[in-house]
Each structure stands twice: as structure tokens, then as C-alpha cells.
Image (cartoon, rainbow, N blue to C red):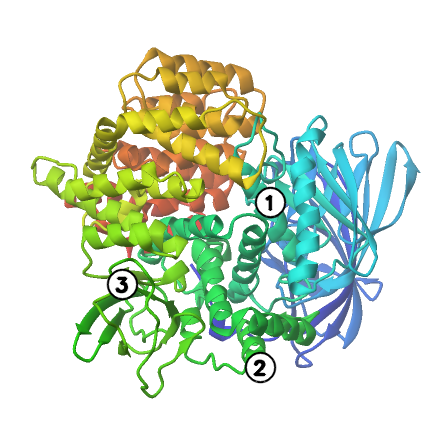
Amino acid sequence: MDKIYLKDYEKPPFVVQTIDLEFELHNTKTLVTSKMQVKRAGKENSPFFLNGEELELISVYLDARELHESEYELNELGLTLHKLPEIFTLEIKNSINPEANTALDGLYKSSGIFCSQNEPEGFRRITYFTDRPDIMAVYTTKIIADKKDYPILLSNGNLFEEGDLGDGKHYAIWKDPFPKPSYLYALVAGDLGCVSDSFTTMNNNEIELNIYCDKGNEAQCSHAMTSLKNSMKWDEERFGREYDLEVYNIVAVDSFNMGAMENKGLNVFNSHYVLADADTATDTNFMGIESVIGHEYFHNWTGNRITCRDWFQLTLKEGLTVFRDQEFSSDLNTRSVQRIADVKALQERQFVEDASPTSHPIKPDAYIQINNFYTATIYEKGAEIIRMIHTIIGEGGFRAGMDLYFKTFDGQAVCTEDFIWSMQEASGFNFDHFKLWYSQSGTPEVDVKTVFDKKSKTLSLTLRQTFFSPTIHEQKPYFFPFKIGLLNNSGHECGLELEDTVGQTLIDKGILLISKEEETFVFKNIKDAPILSLNRNFTAPIKVHTAYSLEEYAFLMAHDQDEFNRFEASQIMASMVLHKLIDAVEANDAMNLSPTYKAAFEKVLLDMDMDMSLKADSLTLPSVSLLMQERAVLDVEAVYVARNFLKRELIRELGADIQTQYASLDRECEYTLESKEMARRKLKNTLLSYMGALKDDTPVLQQYQNSNNMTDRLAALSILANSRGEAKTQALEDFYKRYKDNTLVMNKYLAVIASSELKETPSNVKALLEDEVFDMKVPNLVRSLIGSFARNALHFHAVDGSGYSFIADKVLELDKLNPQIASGLVGVFKDYARLNKEAQGLMKKELEKIVNTKELSKNVYEIVSKILA
Ligand SMILES: [Zn+2]
């Protein structure tokens, strides 16, 4: 299959200045008329190609003259016109079938609602158009539909006109004054409930805010509305950005491939990121809503007003906007808690991706299917790279760079280099070397060595980078900020004084700028050998290796002033202990609880002054997925055995303290989203997860039955789903009965069952495929049931290969319905190279079965062929 390369980019030969669209909505035959004003921008004889897929062409008019079939070329990829004047009007009529669109790409009909999703290349499934982001046109939309079934008609921009047409039909005309790429185009029609509010901007413009949802769910939109108003205020205060239309509409739909979409003035959201109340949503869901509402809103400036020249620039808008939403959440909540959550997500998902055959730079140089590049690398690593720029030039420099970026590029489709230029120009800092982060891949690793010389009172710190990529051969050392601290033996910070060496600098409070493969920094006036706190606050997205012992990490866990590093020390300690245990399981040796780890764990447990969220994070063991990353050859079962052993030992040794503290935190009170309350629930449920390792699951069942909110109820249910007793059956049956009609909550139920370690999990999952709550056409349900099972390493990697075969079959089944969801799922096979021989053989059989299937989508083909290569 054909690859598209960044180096082949050429400017479009024709640009569309305005486009007037008219839709006559119909389930199976929606008529689309598009009238474009086009201007030639390239050579005189260039052909004009318009993408178009799954469309029925009805007619083409050039400057009001209908073209004969012989005057254009038409194939399954689009329409080509030749010999065109310099300026002309093109009017195209075609029809589409929204009901048959199970790919949910372009215009589709689902649960009675017409809805569109056009990023990155859905617009070509609506009408013939040069569907690339550097064509920015002004859109006007007229929607005609049955008034009874579709009283709400929405598109981008401001409402210009609406009225009745007779025959029970009505229409609405929307005009968006801002030129935009086709991927930001949106249309929604349906019989929807609505919650309205308003926001007054910094220049006193009154903006109408609407959130549309299924009727009956209006009461669950209040958190989303509050989050929207907070986002609008925050972007004004932190970045000076004001909203620019009269109205901001959000529509929540159940069937959606992504989390949400930032279409200009008309965001479409997966209902998962809009609807919430205490009874149905967890604290994590509430936080997710705040962050995604913010993210899509912030795109209005970083993505919409300034967009991407081509899809290789995707991180230009996504990395930057994730950074912005992370900062928004940090400013509104607790910064260190947010940082820990963001880094954990990066380590769990992006580090795995970056070590796999699908590893790619945040700015890839080639793709077969761009849909496959909406990855943790482009988004989360992209955000870390923006964060490093922020760290290097500081908040003031960064804000000046952003101001310059908006001033210079507003209304344009640009490249990552234009963003870097703004940062460089505004701050005076040279980012030439730093730019390698955009073109290299893999997670850099840094080995740390220290030599303390008592006589000269100096400490030499030597850092050695390795920068291996699974997919790129020649790589160079990176440039990055590296924040450190030196702790003396009573745990106090030593001052940092660098000996004068050419080219070495210590910027702002302990941040070193690293640029060489190997580099030694010498600190002076150090009295005693210090312990180092390294990569504080995770200033660089790298892995750091030291020769520190468990005792030294226990010291850091107790004394480090950097909250992130206190957490990180707890995780490194637990990992060191767990890897020893895994080795023991693999060698058939006895397992023992490390007394040093036990003491450190106990110290945190009994620390009543510590922030409860940080405490919960520090007492949480590294996930199976994180542990598996560090194993050369995967022995999945050993990882589970070791992890469960450690949990059991900790509750056996410290059970009394864990239970007493749990009891003191388990108080009845009103559910609120205050940081303190969320932290209390998090700590309580962390302790409960240890209690779940006890034989008696009565306290877990009690929490399930008595809790007044989903956070506590779901935490208990997840624990019970791994137990064998009567309590499990009771709770699962109750949960199902109670929430059967709420598809968002049923997602949680499916995920809990599919994630269970119990041996009956595979058969439970198969039974649920046939359950009335499940529907293969709804991406959320697929991700919850099949996706969770695929990430359940114990069952996915079952030694008989049954997990591989089950998922491969589901990938093929899904590929026919929705290739994007299928390729998302097939990524779980990326551990292929690290399996033992037998497992590799079993997996290979399934991967070959997939790749040899006729009419396989480009999406799935691209991922599987990379894994097999
Ligand atoms: Zn985004």
C-alpha cells in the first residue's frame, strides 16, 4: 500500500475561497450541493483534484455550465478536472448514505442523530473537495430536514437564518466567518435536549453557550458547562485568548470514534466526556470532562485559528493543546497531583509505544493511514516537548513566544518550525539542537554516575545519554533541561554552584541544560557526599538510571522536596523489589518481602501530614504494563504472581494499620469534587485494594453497598470482580440491574469484567458479546469490553494462544464495520518481538491471518505490517 511522505509536500494548485453547502437530510440518501469559489494558485495547466470516497456523483457545473462525463475523470478516490480558468465557480451535487456509515467518518446517522466527524479525512466522504488542511475556506451551510424528527439543526459559526419550508420540513443557515480547513467542518441534526448558559468575554462580548445531549440527560451536563466557562476564563487570563463567535455549541453523542472534536463553534463530544453526576461518574470521569472540554476549547486558537499545513504537523496543534489542557487542570486543581497523573499516563502508554515497532517521532515523515497517528506520541510526548520549551525559557518567555505565534500566523496553516521560530524569536534562545525531538524517536535513557571528592569539596556528575530508536537508524544526542537537587545526609538541600566550564549553564533553580552524549558537571563547595534528586518534576521525558540502592531511594522518598520525585522514588523502589520477585518466580526460588521496602511503605502509610493524593500514588504498586516494559522476554504470569505476592505480604504485615486508616477515611458525607475530598477517596480506595487481598471481602462488599457515589462503588466492584466469593456475584448482579439502561455506566461494567484476573474471564467476555447491552457498532462499548480484555495481559497472553486468536477475530470483524477502531485494537500485538518462541509462533499465526485477509483496511494493514517487519 502507498506511503505518503512529508518530503513530497507541494502547495495546492487551486485554493477554495468560499464554499456554500446545502444538505437535504435523509437516512439513506442525503443530497449534498456544494458551490465553491476557486482560484488557481499553481501552474496554468495543473489539473484540479478533489477527493471523494463512497459518494454518488449527480452533477458538476463549471461557471453555471453542466459538464459532460467526458469532461472530468472520476474514480473511487475522487474527481479530476482539467483546463480550468484562473477563477471559477464549481457546483457539485452528490448523495451519501449516512445510515450505512458504520465507520463513523464523514456524515453518519446513529441513535437517531445525524452527526459528522471529519478529522482528518472525513470530509471527502461528504462531498468532492480537496480535503487537506492547507485549504482554508469560508463555509456557509444550509440544512434542510424534517422538523419533527430533527428540530435542532447545527453547523459551524453563527446562526444566520432559519424557517419553515412546508411539507413538515424546516431549514437553518449557518455562516462561519473564519476561514478553516475541511476537517473542522461539522453538521449535527436531531431531536436533542439542551442546557444553555452564557459567558462574558474580557471585551464584554456576551457568548451563548449550549450543550446538547439526549433528552433526559440535561441534568448531567452541569459539570461540562462549568468546565467550559472555566476554560474560556482561563485562556483569557493565562494566554490572552478571547472567544470569537457569538455562540459555542457542544453536542454529546454515544457513537463516536474519538474523545471529542474541536470543530469551529460546534464541538462534537463522545458523551463519556460530557455527562456526569455522582451516581454514574467517577472522580476520574469528572476530571476527564474538565480536561477534554478545556482541550477542545483551547483548540479554537491552537488548531483552528492557526492550523496545520499538512498532517505531518499534527503535534503542532495536539502536543501544544495537550500542554495547554494539562496547565489548565494544574492551575484549577493541585499541580503536583496533575503532574503525577500526566507522567504516569506517558510512562504507561507512550513509553511502550516508543519501544515498539510502531515507534515514531512526534513529527513522522511518512504514513499509510494518518488515522493511525493519533497516538500517545503525537499527543502526550508532544506535550512534554512543549513543556521542555516552557521549562527552558520560563513562563514569561513562553507567553511572549505564544503571543508572537498568534500575531504572526493567525488565519494560516503552518508547520512546527513556525512554532519554534516564534519561541526562539521571542526569547532569544537558540532551539536548533532541541529540534531533534521532532524528528527522532524512542525514549532517551540517561545513565548517571557521581564522584565526590572530600578534599576539594566537589561533586562530579556524569550523564551519559543513549538514544536508541526501534525504527530510526542514525540518531544524535538530545538537548534537554534536567532539573536536579542535592540532598545532604540530613535530607536538606545543598546549594548548587557549578564550576566554570565553557558551554555549561545552570538556569533557574537547579536546571541543567544537557546537550552532549556524555557530559560531566562539577559542583563546588559540597561538604559531604550528597544524594541526588534527578530529573525533578520530570523535566525531560526520559528514563534515568542510577546505581542507587533501595535504602537511598527510601531516603529520597522521605526527604525529597520535589513532590514528583518523592512519588517517583516510591515507584522505583517498588519496581526494584518487584523485578527481584519476578526473577524469583521465573527461577522457581522462594519469594521474600524486602524489609527495606516494607519499612518505607509503612513510613508513608503512617505519615498523617502527607498530601492524601500523593500518599495514595506512593502506596500504589507499578502496573503490570509498566513492569512488563522492563522485562527483556515477557513472562506475563510471573509478573502477576509477583505483584499479587507483594500485595498479600503488605496486607499481612501492615493489615491492622491499613484497616484502621481505611476506617477513618470511610466516612459518610456529601459527594463533592473538592481536591481534598477526591484525595480522600483516592487514598481510601487504594487502601481498600490491599484489603481486597484478604480472605474476607465483607468490607469491600460493604463499601459497594453503602457508597453514595460511583467512585467508591466502582472501586469496590473492581476489587470484587477478582474475588471468588458470593459477594462478587451479588455486587455484579446488583450493578447490572441498576444501570442496565445507562450505556455509559455499562461501559464500566464491561471493563471491570474484561479486566478480571479470574480464569473464567474469557468465557465471561464472550457471553457479554451477546448481551443486550453490547453493540459492536458503538466504539465505547468495543473499547470497554474487547479493548479491556486485549489489555488484560494475563488472558491476552494465555499460553494456548486463545487470547491472540480471539482478538485477531474481533479485529477482522471490526475492520469491516469501522477500520479506525480495528486498528486501535490491533496495536495490542506490538509486544510480538519480546515474546518467547512458543508465544511468538502463536501470535505470528494470528498476525499473518490478519495481514493476508482480502480487502483489509489500510489502517490495520499499516500497524500489522510494522509489527511483523
Ligand atoms: Zn486535540
Q: Residue 381 or 52: which is nearer the viewer? A: 381
Of label 3 and label 1, which has the lower sequence position?
1
Give the secondary structure at mark 3.
loop
Mark 1 and mark 2 in contact? Answer it, CB < 8 Å: no
Real-space Cα distance between discs 1 and 2?
A: 33 Å
From the image, which quarter does the N terminus lie in?
Answer: bottom left
The residue depicted at 49 percent of the width and 60 percent of the height is 383
Of label 1 and label 2, which has the lower sequence position?
1
The residue depicted at 80 percent of the width and 70 percent of the height is 88
Res. 103 in view: no
Identify whether 279 is placed above or below 235: above
- Residue type highlighted by circle 2: Glu
Label 3 packing within 10 angstroms: few (<14), some (14-19), many (20+): some
- Residue type highlighted by circle 1: Glu
Q: Is residue 553 left or right of residue 816?
A: left
Q: Which mark is residue 488?
A: 3
Q: Is residue 647 left or right of residue 197?
A: left
Image coordinates for residue 546, horizontal then vertical, percent? 22, 61
Label 1 packing within 10 angstroms: few (<14), some (14-19), many (20+): many
Query: Residue 286 lies in what quarter of the image?
Result: top right
Is the distance from the Cβ of mark 2 to the nearest ligand 1 atom less than 8 Å?
no
Q: Which mark is residue 290?
A: 1
Give the secondary structure at mark 2.
helix
- Which residue is the site of mark 2? 425
Res. 570 in view: yes
Number of marks: 3
Image coordinates for residue 692, horizontal then vertical, percent? 32, 24
Real-space Cα distance between discs 3 and 1?
A: 41 Å
- Residue type highlighted by circle 3: Asn
Give the secondary structure at mark 1.
helix
Q: Is residue 540 left or right of residue 499?
A: right
